[in-house]
Structure formats: C-alpha cells, structure tokens
Amino acid sequence: MYDMAIELHTDGSRRLYEQIYDYIKTEIRDGKLLAGERLPSTRSLAEYLQVARSTVEYAYGQLLSEGYIESRPYRGYFVCAMEGLLCMEEPADREEVDRPSADAYSISDGNAEGEKVECNYNFSPHEIDMSGFPFGVWRKITRNILTYGNSELFARGEAQGDYDLRETVSRYLHSSRGVNCEPEQIIVGAGNDYLLMLLEKILGRQVRIAMENPTYIRTYRIFHSFAYDIVTVDMDECGMRTDCLVRENASAAYVMPSHQFPMGIVMPIGRRMELLKWAAGREGRYLIEDDYDSEFRYCGKPIPALMASDKQGKVIYIGTFSKAIAPAIRVSFMVLPQALLERYRRECSFYSCTVSRIDQRILNEFIRDGYFERHLNKMRKIYRAKQELLLRCLEPFRDKFEVSGENTGLHLILTSREDVAEEELLGRAEREGVRVYGLSESIVEEFHRRATVLIGFGGMTQEQIAEGMKRLEKAWL
C-alpha cells in the first residue's frame, strides 16, 4: 500500500480524524481499496499528511470498530472483505540527461594553459542515490520470476504494456497522486523519450506547443525534432503565466506543476485551475503534465497531480520510475484522456511495447508487494538529511545569494544578489574542483536575469556535500 493523497480541510468545519476515516471508508466501499490490502502505518500516514499520529490512530480505531479494517500483529492494518457491500472486479524519469556519471571530471583551469583540475564534487541536479536501492529484493523477485515463469512470459505482450502492471500503476496514481484513471488509459514505455515520440503520432504534426522558459531542455529538443511550432511562455512565482499563454494561440502546453525544472516552483491550485480553464476553452487543447519527481516532497502536505483536478479530459499525464527507483529501470508511463485514447487505438496501437515483459513483471511485483513504498520512505529520509545538511552549509551564502526550491526535489537554486556573471561563478567553482550547473543550460530564449546556479544533492554523499560546499565557500565568498 502507498501513502494516500487525502485532501484535508483545516478550516475547523470537520475534525481531521473524521476526514481520514471518511476517505478510507469511501475508498473501501467504492472498491478502490481491495480486501486484504495493507494500509500505511499510522506513523507513515501521519508523517505524510503532516498531522499528529494520534489523529490517524483515532481514524483507524473507528474503522477497526466498524469492521472495515483489521489489525494483524506485527504486520499492520489490512482491509477486510466486505461481501455483499462491494462489487469487486477481478483484474483482466524525469529521464536522466545524458551526463557523465563518474564522480571525477577533468576540466580546464583558466589560469594555466593546458593544466587540468580534477573535479571530484559534482552537484548534478540529475543524479540520484543508488546506495539505498534494495538490490537483494530486486534479485529475489527476478529469480522467482525466472524460476517459476512460463512460456507466456516470453511471448509478445500487449502494446500498451502488461495489464497487471498498468492496473498496479493506476492504483498507485490514485493513492499517491489523486489521479483516477483506468488501466486502459495507461501506456507503458521505455523512457519519456519514447512516450513523447508516441504522443507526437497521437497529437499529429500540426501542433503549436507552449513551454515554460526556462524548461527541461531535453524535452524541448525532442519537441524541436518533431518540427513542432514551439513558443516560450514567461513564468512568475506560480509557474507558467496563463495571461501570456492565452496570447500565444497554442494547442498544447507542457508543464511541470508538482516541481518545475529547473526553478523548483510548485504550482498553486489557483494557477492550475487557470491552466485547466485555458485548456477547456477550445476543442483540441491539451496540457502535458510531466510529473517526474513528485515522490520527493519535504515540506507541507502532499499536492495532488494536475490530472487529479481535470474533469474534462484535458490533461496528458507522464510519469517515470527513473528518479524514484533507478535510471536503468527505463520504465515510464503515460495516461491519456479518453478522447486521445480512442485516437491512439485507431492510429497507433500497432506500435509494440518497448519494455521487456520480464522487467514489467519485476516492477509490478516490486510495487504491488509494498517494496516500492518502503524504498520511497527510506529514500525520502536519506534525501531530507542531505538537503538539511546542504541548507546548513548554505547559511554563510545567504548574504550574497537567494536560496529557493527547498520544498521538493533533489536540487536547490542559488540566485546571486550581486552583479556577477554566471560563467564566472561556474569558473570559480571549477577551479576549486567543484561542478555546479548554470541556469543558462535550461534557457530556450535568454531574458534579463541575475546569475543563477543549480546545486543538486541526490547523487552525493553527506561527506562530499560538506567538503564541496567548503570549496564553494572558498570560491564564491
């Protein structure tokens, strides 16, 4: 079981434990939570919802007393079978930018011709920590599948991906991101690149697409390769400006509302509603939601996906397991609204799934059996500790830099308060053996701005972070 995207109202109209109780009861009665499914622990759910643990315990206690759930010693809480009450149906990344992964870089020192400086501290915003990956669990699942699998496992699978995995993904999206979708709406593919290329076949070539500036440059290059008419839209502290979007006469907009890359903006509900209103204003308009790392949020309550608020079928949702599990997994998924699903079936269903059925089975069991949930909880704690260390190390920098983007994701943004060139900051860091990343790498059309750098912490150890920041302090302060 995963954490639950419960929208709690804190206006005092209803007690928090009653809202949690009602939500879970409704999920059970509607068949969203199945008999025998494990609920999050009281500690895990309380931490996720940012409420007292006793609040969750009260809700669980009421559900226990009414027979909706049961407590199993040393195992947790599970959904009870509700014969006659429920109608149960039987089942029928951000992608990584291509950068060197080695810890050491060889870079030119601007002060000595031909001399090389070893760069041992790479604050890449694209790397993740693989030290916490449950290799033993992954090996066990793989071994069991290969041992007990049959010839069907090696046959050609469904074009959209195996149904079991799509059903598991749909239930994960519902519980963690508030997205209500059917397995039939999901397409599984080997990375976001493939899904975007497939989307080009679905939407067609005559597309005028709007993108934020700055944006995720890899996606921009992919859209550019389609010969799409790409327009950039200004951003403010809430994300893409809808007043600018209206003027561009676009038919689609690519957005990252849960954590905009590279600026780290979490789009508030008001701006999301404005985008949905724009999309609903004309037939054929769509929002492409890239939800590449929403699992890693450190402050406040979980925010549902943009698609969770879409009532008119205007959002195309793209997610990946590259950040949450491992880049080499190469499994992404796309959720299509019904209108585009029909177009896909009519015009594109002959494309074969690009993910091995064995890999799909492994991932399905990894998620379904609760290993993914435990892995995410572990990695959130690891990344939170790294981020807290990085923020402490950044305290001496605050007189000269604004720090932002600390609520979610695996990088922070530093914006200079002084009149200094971005290239100069990068060069000073390199001469101290530190690699940081300039905002210019994500800019499509240059605009007036102060020097800004991205400092990632996902792929570094705490010792590397501490030493790297000491060197940056020497370089910049």
Image (spheres, rainbow, N blue to C red):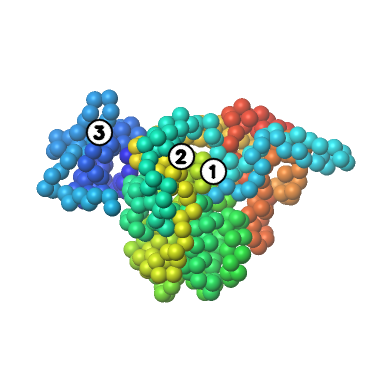
In this figure, which residue is indicated by the disc labeled 3? Answer: 77
In the orientation shown, which residue stands out farthest toward the front? 151
In this figure, which residue is indicated by the disc labeled 1? Answer: 327
Give how far apart the Cα atoms at labels 2 and 3 are. 25 Å
Give how far apart the Cα atoms at labels 1 and 3 are. 33 Å
Q: Position of residue 101 (x, y in %)?
A: 64, 39
Query: Is residue 26 left or right of 343 when viewed as pictured?
Result: left
In the orientation shown, which residue stands out farthest toward the left? 84
Residues at circles 2 and 3 in contact by the CB criterion of under 8 Å: no
Residues at circles 1 and 2 in contact by the CB criterion of under 8 Å: no
Question: Please, what is the three-letter code of the amino acid marked with disc 2?
Answer: Tyr
Q: Specify the label residue 298 is tagged with.
A: 2
Does the image show residue 451? yes
If the image is split into quadrants, where does the N terminus sit?
Answer: top left
Residue at 60% of width from left, 34% of height from top?
A: 460
- In terms of image quadrants, where is residue 209? bottom right
Residue at 53% of width from left, 74% of height from top?
A: 206
Query: Is residue 160 left or right of 461 when viewed as pictured?
Result: left
Give how far apart the Cα atoms at labels 1 and 2 are. 22 Å
Q: Position of residue 202 (x, y in %)?
A: 47, 67
Question: Please, what is the three-letter code of the amino acid marked with disc 1?
Answer: Pro
Q: Earlier in the sequence, mark 2 or mark 3?
A: 3
Q: Which element type, helix, strand or loop, lies under badge 1?
A: helix
Q: Position of residue 267 (x, y in %)?
A: 46, 54
Q: Nearer the viewer, mark 1 or mark 3?
A: 1
Residue at 36% of width from left, 56% of height from top?
A: 308
